[in-house]
């Protein structure tokens, strides 16, 4: 599988990390354009964002940007990396439709956005994956260009967000262990739905609004080549 993966982090402590050798394009420097000629797109990396090739977990305390471009013909996994799902997504987006759900997305966050006169993208948010203990703050853009599937994910600093919005979380010692917060699924409506409503009306801490707006700025900066 030919995959170009960049992880951009806000932590200055990680600024000395070197790019992963699997990356198909040169490392991104602060405030410059990221360009992938093979997949036919470029975007602006906001000033102050640093390359961080390390893997990220749900409890990281930094904001990170993943840019992944994979040839559709090389997709051979489940879900987002399924060739069959990619073909369904491409057919739906050609009709300006969202198509099948992918990832562990929040249904109310589904949207189709134009990137150009002939290209549309799926946009959505993921607030957790795989199991109840996981928390994520991911805004995701998925589109297809030049035979590539492109996934752009901006992940917020989970620990900082949890600390700033404790009303949406609680501890479940029997499921996740002591001191590990999880989304309050027992709330009515569920906490992740309450959070999304607050987010889309601007009723969240500034650190969360900044992350939300940064994703919009990145998407707006995308140019198709």
Image: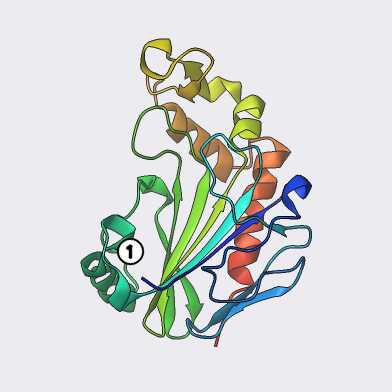
Left or right: 132 as drawn, with respect to 100:
right
Classed neighbour count for the residue bearing mark 1: other residues with Cα under 10 Å, few (<14), some (14–19), many (≥20): many
Mark 1 lies on a secondary structure that is: loop
* Residue 16 image position (x, y, % from top left): 75, 55
Residue drawn 43% across and 33% down? 134
Instruction: Place residue 144 in its image quadrant.
Output: bottom left
* Residue 82 image position (x, y, % from top left): 26, 63
Judge whether 133 appears above or below 98 on screen. above
Residue drawn 66% across and 33% down? 160
**Could you tell me which quadrant the C terminus lies in?**
bottom right
Coloring scheme used: rainbow
Judge whether 205 appears above or below 63 on screen. above
Judge whether 29 appears above or below 63 on screen. below
Instruction: Tell which of 21 and 211 is nearer to you.
Output: 21
For label 1, the residue is 98
Q: Is residue 95 visible?
A: no
- Which residue occupies the extreme left position in the image? 84
Instruction: Tell which of 105 and 25 is nearer to you.
Output: 25
Residue drawn 26% across and 56% down? 78
* Residue 180 image position (x, y, % from top left): 51, 20
Instruction: Place residue 75 in its image quadrant.
Output: bottom left
Left or right: 127 as drawn, with respect to 202:
left
* Residue 212 image position (x, y, % from top left): 61, 50
Instruction: Tell which of 156 and 20 is nearer to you.
Output: 20
How many callouts does the rendering have?
A: 1
């Amino acid at each position: 599988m030919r995959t170009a993966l960049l992880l951009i982090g806000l932590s200055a402590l990680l600024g000395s990390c070197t790019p992963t050798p699997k990356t198909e394009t040169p490392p991104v420097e602060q405030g410059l354009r990221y360009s992938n000629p093979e997949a036919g797109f470029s975007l602006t990396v906001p000033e102050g964002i640093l390359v961080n090739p390390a893997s990220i977990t749900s409890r990281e305390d930094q904001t990170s940007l993943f840019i992944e471009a994979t040839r559709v013909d090389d997709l051979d996994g489940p879900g987002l990396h399924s060739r069959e799902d990619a073909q369904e997504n491409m057919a739906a987006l050609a009709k300006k439709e969202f198509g099948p759900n992918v990832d562990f997305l929040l249904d109310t966050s589904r949207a189709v956005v134009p990137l150009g006169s002939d290209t549309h993208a799926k946009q959505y948010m993921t607030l957790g994956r795989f199991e109840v203990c996981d928390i994520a703050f991911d805004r995701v853009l998925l589109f297809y260009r030049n035979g590539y599937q492109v996934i752009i994910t901006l992940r917020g600093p989970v620990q900082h967000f949890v600390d700033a919005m404790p009303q949406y979380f609680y501890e479940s010692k029997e499921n996740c262990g002591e001191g590990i917060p999880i989304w309050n699924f027992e709330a009515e409506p569920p906490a992740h739905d309450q959070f999304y409503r607050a987010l889309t009306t601007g009723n969240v801490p500034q650190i969360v609004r900044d992350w939300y707006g940064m994703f919009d700025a990145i998407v707006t900066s995308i140019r198709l080549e």
